[in-house]
């Protein structure tokens, strides 16, 4: 129940973050990057349908495809996000109608049009969901190819971004193209930062003390490997463990205090599969 409540909260918060970025900064400036909402900007220019209504219809169609290809669990999470995003955009149109951008600084607004939806999308991807639209296409590409989600989004969105040059003007088109590239890069970076952990190699003569601290105080596991010092020929132990950034600080301080002669190699990692981390 706790896990479901956490996922539900993340789904809601991330979707609302996306809605704010899309409505206040993307729609108002006619930026055409970002999948279905980018297409919606183009469609709203020529047809008597709002960008929000168009997004909802197309998202439902892609949701059905996602259900078939990616599974029921994905579709359930995506359905909630898709509906919440469309409803939020429709409510914002009625509560705070916008006939022009918030400011006269398009570059500043572009930053928020990139940052907020990218952050929302990354949170959704990280829990195995999406806001629908071309996100579904990107996740299908991720499932069957080695293409990263960010690159998949860039591939699926590029054609609609380029259309902004023809429908609006070169300035808007260039902003949209820049936004597409940055959004794709930010999503992968956000996802990596969410999952970032510290991977420790600890070379020591006192493995028991350090392992007790890892297991009892940090509530993490560790692996001990027997080793021999190449210079001294002394028996050594190599302790392998993966910790969160905050736990890593505690372990470094503990080792510094209790085994100052230990040799540490610490590296960042975001792909950890196993008990206590991600399942296969």
Image: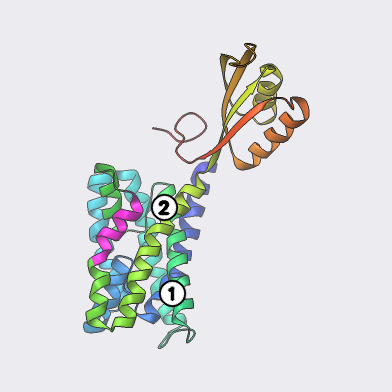
Can you tell which mark lies on residue 110? 1
How far is the residue under mark 1 from the one under mark 2? Answer: 19 Å
Residue that lies at the very extreme toward the front in this rendered image: 231
Q: Is 270 on the left-hand or right-hand side of 261?
A: left
Question: Residue 77: image x %, image y %?
Answer: 38, 51
Is 104 on the left or on the right of 156, as rendered? right
Q: Is residue 159 in sight in this rendering? A: yes
Query: What range is drawn magenta here?
Result: 148-158
> Where is residue 78 shown, x and y percent of the image?
35, 54
Q: Is residue 255 left or right of residue 224?
A: right
Specify whether residue 1 is in view.
no
Give the secondary structure at mark 2.
helix
Is 216 left or right of 27, judged from the image as shown?
A: right
In the image shown, does 232 or 210 lie closer to the viewer? 232
Quadrant location of the C terminus in the rendered image: top left
Looking at the image, is mark 1 or mark 2 earlier in the sequence? Answer: 1
- Based on the picture, tell me whether residue 279 belongs to the magenta stretch: no
Residue contact at pointers 1 and 2, CB within 8 angstroms: no
The quarter of the displayed image where residue 64 is located:
bottom left
Please provide percent x and percent y for residue 57.
Answer: 25, 67
Image label count = 2
* Disc 2 crowd, CA 10 A, few/some/many (<14, 14-19, 20+): some
Q: How is the image coloured?
A: rainbow
Question: Badge 2 is on which residue?
Answer: 188
Q: Nearer the viewer, residue 24 or 256?
A: 256
Q: Residue at x 40, y 88 (%)?
A: 99
Looking at the image, residue 261 lies above or below residue 167: above
* Residue at the image position 35 percent from the left and 61 percent from the top: 82
Q: 272 and 86: which one is in front?
A: 272
Looking at the rendered structure, the secondary structure element under dot 1 is helix
The residue lying at 35 percent from left, 50 percent from top is: 76
Main SS, magenta region, reads helix
């Amino acid at each position: 129940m706790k896990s479901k409540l956490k996922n539900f909260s993340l789904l809601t918060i991330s979707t609302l973050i996306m809605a704010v970025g899309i409505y206040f900064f993307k729609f108002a400036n006619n930026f055409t990057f970002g999948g279905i909402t980018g297409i919606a900007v183009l469609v709203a220019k020529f047809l008597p349908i709002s960008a929000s209504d168009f997004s909802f219809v197309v998202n439902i169609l892609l949701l059905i495809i996602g259900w078939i290809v990616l599974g029921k669990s994905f579709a359930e999470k995506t359905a909630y996000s898709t509906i919440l995003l469309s409803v939020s955009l429709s409510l914002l149109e009625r509560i705070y109608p916008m006939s022009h951008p918030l400011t006269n600084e398009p570059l500043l607004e572009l930053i928020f049009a990139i940052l907020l939806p990218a952050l929302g999308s990354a949170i959704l991807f990280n829990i195995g969901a999406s806001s629908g639209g071309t996100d579904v296409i990107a996740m299908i590409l991720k499932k069957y190819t080695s293409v990263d989600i960010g690159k998949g989004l860039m591939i699926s969105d590029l054609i609609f971004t380029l259309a902004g040059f023809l429908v609006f003007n070169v300035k808007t088109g260039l902003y949209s193209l820049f936004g597409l590239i940055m959004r794709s890069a930010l999503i992968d970076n956000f996802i990596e930062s969410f999952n970032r952990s510290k991977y420790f190699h600890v070379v020591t003569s006192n493995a028991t003390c350090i392992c007790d601290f890892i297991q009892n105080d940090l509530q993490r596991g560790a692996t001990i490997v027997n080793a021999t010092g190449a210079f001294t020929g002394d028996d050594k132990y190599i302790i392998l463990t993966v910790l969160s950034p905050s736990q890593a600080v505690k372990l470094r301080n503990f080792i510094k205090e209790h085994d100052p002669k230990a040799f540490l190699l610490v590296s960042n990692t975001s792909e950890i599969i196993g008990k206590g981390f991600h399942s296969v």
